[in-house]
Structure formats: structure tokens, C-alpha cells
Amino acid sequence: MIELDRAEVTVWSPDPVSGRDRTVRILGPVTLSLTERRVAVVGANGSGKSTLARLVDALVLPSAGTVRVDGLDTVRDGAAVRRRVGFLFTDPDAQVVMPTPAEDVALSLRRTTGSAAERRSAARAWLDRFGLADHADLPVHALSAGQRQLLALAAVLATEPAVLVCDEPTTLLDLRWRRVVDQLLDALEQQVVLVTHDLEAAARADRVLVVDQGQVVHDGPPGPALVRYRELMSEAPRAAGVRAP
């Protein structure tokens, strides 16, 4: 279970006119309890949806309020939370760090699998599950964008997280690879929190959060939520809200 209790993210930033420090609210306060197997998060660029996703994995810590995953507080128990929550980035090049697919998945297994030989064997088994066995020892840069995203997903799932947070995982992919990744995500047993601009993917979720100006402005089944999202997208863009110092 993912629980946010008045979670808020703020940053300090100088006012462009006065030069005085001001508090800029990026997100919140947000109070949610997410138990559904598939939760989609939609919103305009800069709305705060990626910040919301990063709160779940303790990549961003709340400035106020609390975030818990299965009872673990992201501030006090950040390492334990990150072991339970996998995170898939938009760009696999921000996530894949080793020269070959086999080495990259083996790196993910360093805390859970004993010997180097066991890690190599397990890594190849994971790559086989994702159709990348024949590419195990190729340079990562020789893979297509879709194959690199599959590699990133394999490396994350090899750690067997309870929750997978995906931040626009198909944005950089063509239609063919988007379908491949979507199908894999739909078939996972884990709870998945999907930040996306793909309304077809959002429509398959059990619950959709619509984020706007740092607030969750709609929360519910996909149908009404996506109607609300389309309404927001038809409005003229607005400047982000800023709190006075």
C-alpha cells in the first residue's frame, strides 16, 4: 500500500524581480491511499506528476507530511523503500550504466544474488524473459531504443520489487515498441504506478490521478478522470503557483 498524508514538496528559489528567496511549491499537499494494482498519473508537463512518482520511491523526499510504502516511511526508511519500489525512467540511457546487457542486469543483482557466476546466470535468465538473450554481450549502444527500455525494465524487475513506478516509459519509443512495453507492464504482478501521456495506457488502469498545478485535481476511474484531463488540456497554460516568503 502506498500512503501519502499531506505530502508536500517545496523548493527555495530567488524571486526574479526582487531577488528575495521565496518558497515555490512543486506539489501538494497530497493525501492518498493507493491500493489498486494499476494506478495511472496524468497531467501536463510541469504539473508535478513526476514529482509525485518520485515521492513513492524516495527519490524525492517530502518537505512536509509523510509518504509510506507498506508502512515504511520514505524519510526514515529510504533504503528499505527503494528495495521495495523499482523505478523505470523515461530515458533508459539515464538508467543503464554498464557496457553490456548481461553486466547491467548482473549489477542489479549484486545485493540479492551471491556469487558472480550466479549473478551472470540469473542475468541471462532475465534477459531471456525479455527477448534479449541474443543481445546479452552486445554493447548497449548497439541496442535500439525499445531494446534499451526492455533492458532497463529487466534490470529493475530482477530485484523483484513489490511496486514498480514508471515515469513516462514509452515517451521515447515508436508505436511498435510502445505496444511491447505496454503489454509487458500490463502483465506484471506488481503494483504499477504509471506516469504517462498515453491515454490508451491510462484508460487500462484501475485508477487515474489527474495532476494540475501541483495538486491532484481528480482521482477515480479512468473514464471520468480522462474527461477531466482533456478539459484541462483545452485550457490556456497557467503559471505555476508560488508562495510568498
Image (tube, grey):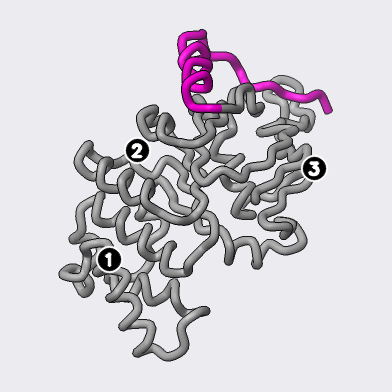
Tell me the kind of residue under disc 3.
Ala
Residue 152's place in the image compared with 36, above or below, is below
Please say whether residue 49 is visible from this viewpoint: yes
Q: Disc 3 and disc 2: Cα gap in Å?
A: 31 Å
Q: Please state which of residues 34 and 242 is positioned toward the viewer in this rendering.
A: 34
Q: Disc 3 and disc 1: Cα gap in Å?
A: 41 Å
Residue at (60% x, 17% y) in the render: 239
Q: Is residue 92 left or right of residue 25?
A: left
Q: Is residue 142 left or right of residue 33?
A: left
Q: Name the N-terminal-most of marks 3 and 2.
A: 3
Where does label 2 land, which residue? 171
Where does label 3 land, which residue? 64
Q: Name the N-terminal-most of marks 2 and 1.
A: 1
Where does label 1 land, which residue? 129
The kind of secondary structure element at disc 2 is loop
> What residue range appears in magenta?
221-245
Q: Residue 74, position in %: x, y?
A: 70, 56
Q: Residues within 10 Å of mark 1 (few under 14, many from 20)?
A: few
